Amino acid sequence: MLLMVSGQWMLSILRRQLFINTCTFLMVVVVVLHVSALYSRTVLTFVLKILTLILVESCFEFHMFFNCRNATLALPILAFTSASEPPC
């Protein structure tokens, strides 16, 4: 029962984190595209826009990898500590 509840809790945390990261990424994309729209005729701005989007995407992938890894490590620790508590 505890593992099922902990698993649902972990999935809820991961879904919320994915939603937050997606919203943040979309906000960055909108800001980059909006600001660079004024200077869209220059090649340098286009290159900087592409590089910025690639950098932001790679940062989110790196961040999500460590969040998933930490959540996977936290589940056995939570189960072990919950099982070792004396009953009240």
Image: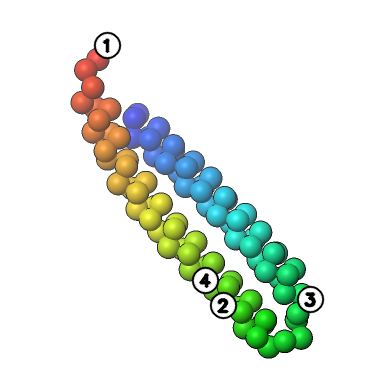
Residue at mark 1: 88
- Secondary structure at numbered mark 1: loop
Q: Are marks 2 and 1 in contact (CB under 8 Å)?
A: no
Mark 3, Cα crowd under 10 Å, few <14 / some 14-19 / many 20+, is few
Q: Give the alpha-carbon distance from disc 2 to disc 1, as whole Å.
A: 57 Å
Residue at mark 4: 55
Q: Residue furthest top?
A: 88
Q: Give the alpha-carbon distance from disc 2 to disc 4, as whole Å.
A: 6 Å
Q: Are marks 1 and 4 in contact (CB under 8 Å)?
A: no
Nearer the observer, disc 2 or disc 1?
A: 2
Residue at mark 2: 51
**Residue 56 lies in what quarter of the image?**
bottom right
Numbered label attached to residue 38: 3
Front-lying residue, 24 or 81: 24
Question: Residue at 49% across / 61% down in the picture?
Answer: 60
Q: Are marks 2 and 4 in contact (CB under 8 Å)?
A: yes
Q: Which circle's residue, 1 or 3, is located before the other in the chain?
A: 3
Q: Which amino acid type is shown beneath numbered disc 3?
A: Leu
Front-lying residue, 25 or 80: 25
**Residue 46 lies in what quarter of the image?**
bottom right
Location of residue 47 in the rendering, given as x and y in whole percent from the top left corner: 62, 83
Give the answer, above or below, for where 75 lies relative to 44: above
Q: Which circle's residue, 2 or 1, is located before the other in the chain?
A: 2
Front-lying residue, 22 or 49: 49
Left or right: where does residue 52 sit relative to residue 59? Answer: right
Location of residue 52 in the rendering, given as x and y in whole percent from the top left corner: 58, 73
Q: Which circle's residue, 1 or 4, is located before the other in the chain?
A: 4
Give the answer, above or below, for where 68 lies relative to 51: above
Q: Give the alpha-carbon distance from disc 3 to disc 4, as whole Å.
A: 22 Å
